[in-house]
């Protein structure tokens, strides 16, 4: 399965910024562990602080990937353009991830334009949220019970 992880603004500083909220692990550390753990899967990683670059990456991955795991950072709460870009690829599985529990924070974080175009949303699990999303995608055909 081809999985594209796409991160938005300020997530390049994860591990340094607001550690009490976002944790102490950087995405470089996470991606190294992730590539080890899922060595047989094609998992790409892209991060940008600019909305247009994120949209361009979605357009690229929309043609290449089976699934996108996206944390659009603060753009989640503002960007109709990123949500529209995801909607351009109806066959794509989309999982929205947030490191923090956005529902336990300021009101403006409780709305996400990305949630409405995602199959699932994971928040509040830190980096493990991305791992959970990958596990869900890989076991998507498995039923419980
Ligand atoms: C975030 C939550 C957003 O509200 C915030 O702007 C971020 C990170 C998260 O992963 O918890 O930059 O997406």
Image (cartoon, rainbow, N blue to C red):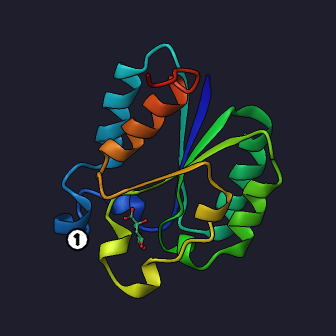
- Which quarter of the figure has residue 112? bottom right
Quadrant (top left, top right, bottom left, bottom right) of the C terminus: top left
Q: Quadrant of ligand 1?
A: bottom left
Quadrant (top left, top right, bottom left, bottom right) of the N terminus: top right
**Count of residue discs:** 1
Q: Is residue 76 above or below residue 117?
A: below
Q: In this view, does 18 lie to the left or right of 32?
A: left
Numbered disc 1: secondary structure:
loop
Residue at 31% from the left image edge and 79% from the top image edge: 105
- Which quarter of the figure has residue 61? top right
Q: Which residue lies furthest to the front in this view?
A: 145
Residue at 60% from the left image edge and 69% from the top image edge: 50
Nearest the viewer among 92 and 2 is 92
x and y percentages locating residue 98 in the rendered image: 41, 59
Residue at 73% from the left image edge and 55% from the top image edge: 86
Q: Which residue lies furthest to the bottom in this view?
A: 107
The residue where tag 1 is placed is: 18
Residue at 44% from the left image edge and 16% from the top image edge: 39
x and y percentages locating residue 85 in the rendered image: 77, 59
x and y percentages locating residue 49 in the rendered image: 53, 67
């Amino acid at each position: 399965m081809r999985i594209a992880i796409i991160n938005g603004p300020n997530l390049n500083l994860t591990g340094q910024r607001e550690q009490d909220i976002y944790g102490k692990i950087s995405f470089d550390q996470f991606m190294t562990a992730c590539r080890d753990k899922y060595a047989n899967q094609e998992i790409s990683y892209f991060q940008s602080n600019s909305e247009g670059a994120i949209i361009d990456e979605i357009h690229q991955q929309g043609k290449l990937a089976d699934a996108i795991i996206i944390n659009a950072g603060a753009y989640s709460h503002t960007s109709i353009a990123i949500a529209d870009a995801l909607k351009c690829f109806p066959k794509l599985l989309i999982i929205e991830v947030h490191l923090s529990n956005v529902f336990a924070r300021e009101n403006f974080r409780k709305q996400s334009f990305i949630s409405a175009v995602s199959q699932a949303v994971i928040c509040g699990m830190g980096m493990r949220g991305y791992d959970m999303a990958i596990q869900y995608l890989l076991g998507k055909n498995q039923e419980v019970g």
